[in-house]
Image (tube, rainbow, N blue to C red):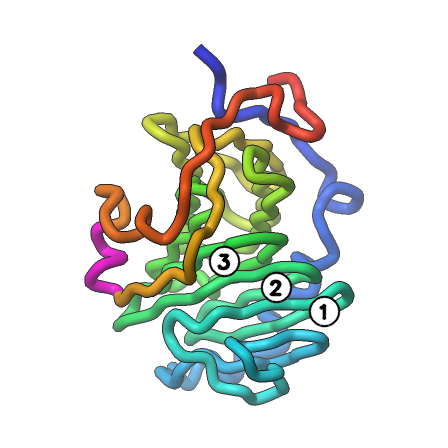
Amino acid sequence: MRKAFNAREISLIRGISPAIYVTLALILGSWASLRTGSRSSRRVTFANGASIGIATASNGSTIFSGDLLKTGEAGRLQIQSGTIQFVLDARSAARIFKTGDRVLVELEQGSLAYSAKGVSENLTLFAQDIRFVPRTTELAVGQITIISRCDVQASTSRSSLEATSGKETRTIDANKSYSVIPLFGVDYKRFLEADLARLSRISAHADYHRSHNHIACSPGDQKNPKAP
């Protein structure tokens, strides 16, 4: 039986993408605005070579639940959603869904850094059918990167991150990085169209799985497999 997780401890200085440090800077620079407890829709705080649906993203643009967010070859998109902030790196695509205090992110390609203030935010991220849940009872900062359909890497610099692939769950401690081989890779056949009520059944593999096809993965599918 194959192992879904390949672990490697990393150096914060050398191993984590600059996107995480950008995210940390965003947190430290925005505590004042977060303390006001804003409940507004998600908004863009920085955009370069990015789009929201078919429109060009710009600073201050509003993002609605389920909008497709994409960045170009040298693009970057920074988003604030309540007390949570995201950085979408170049050549990436994602959707953010939110109702009440629940935030769910579907990373379709590329890399996404996240930061949560640490007030028990209800945050879940999905990448290639892998479920990631940061521990948000404290400042949580990390990054999810899709290397290929069958190779996903997750790093944390603050707090821990719980990753679930199939029936296996692993806790990724702060300052560590893991390569995860999903049971199935994902090939999107249409845009994900869902509201939170449908997404709440995501763990039961309901409507979420209708948005894509599955491709079986094996350890050899990783571009740079790491020994446990």
Q: Determine the residue positioned at 51% across, 61% down.
A: 94
Q: CA distance from mark 1 to mark 2?
A: 8 Å
Q: Nearer the viewer, residue 47 or 108?
A: 108
Q: CA distance from mark 3 to mark 2?
A: 19 Å
Q: Is residue 80 left or right of residue 36?
A: right
* Residue 38 in which image quadrant: bottom left
Circle nearer the N terminus (3, 1): 1
Q: Determine the residue positioned at 62% across, 20% down.
A: 220
Are the residues flagged by discs 1 and 2 in contact, CB closer than 8 Å?
Answer: yes
Relative to 148, residue 117 above or below: below
In the rendered image, residue 42, in percent from the top left (x then y), is placed at 45, 79
Tell me the tag on residue 139: 3
Q: Determine the residue positioned at 70% across, 67% down.
A: 72
The crowd level at tag 1 (other Cα within 10 Å; few <14, some 14-19, many 20+) is some
Q: CA distance from mark 3 to mark 1?
A: 27 Å
- Asked whether residue 198 is drawn in magenta, I would say yes
In the picture of the structure, the residue carrying the numbered disc 1 is 75
**Tag 3 secondary structure:** loop
In the rendered image, residue 135, in percent from the top left (x then y), is placed at 41, 49
In the picture of the structure, the residue carrying the numbered disc 2 is 88
* Residue 183 in which image quadrant: top left
Q: What amino acid is labelled 3 in the image?
A: Leu
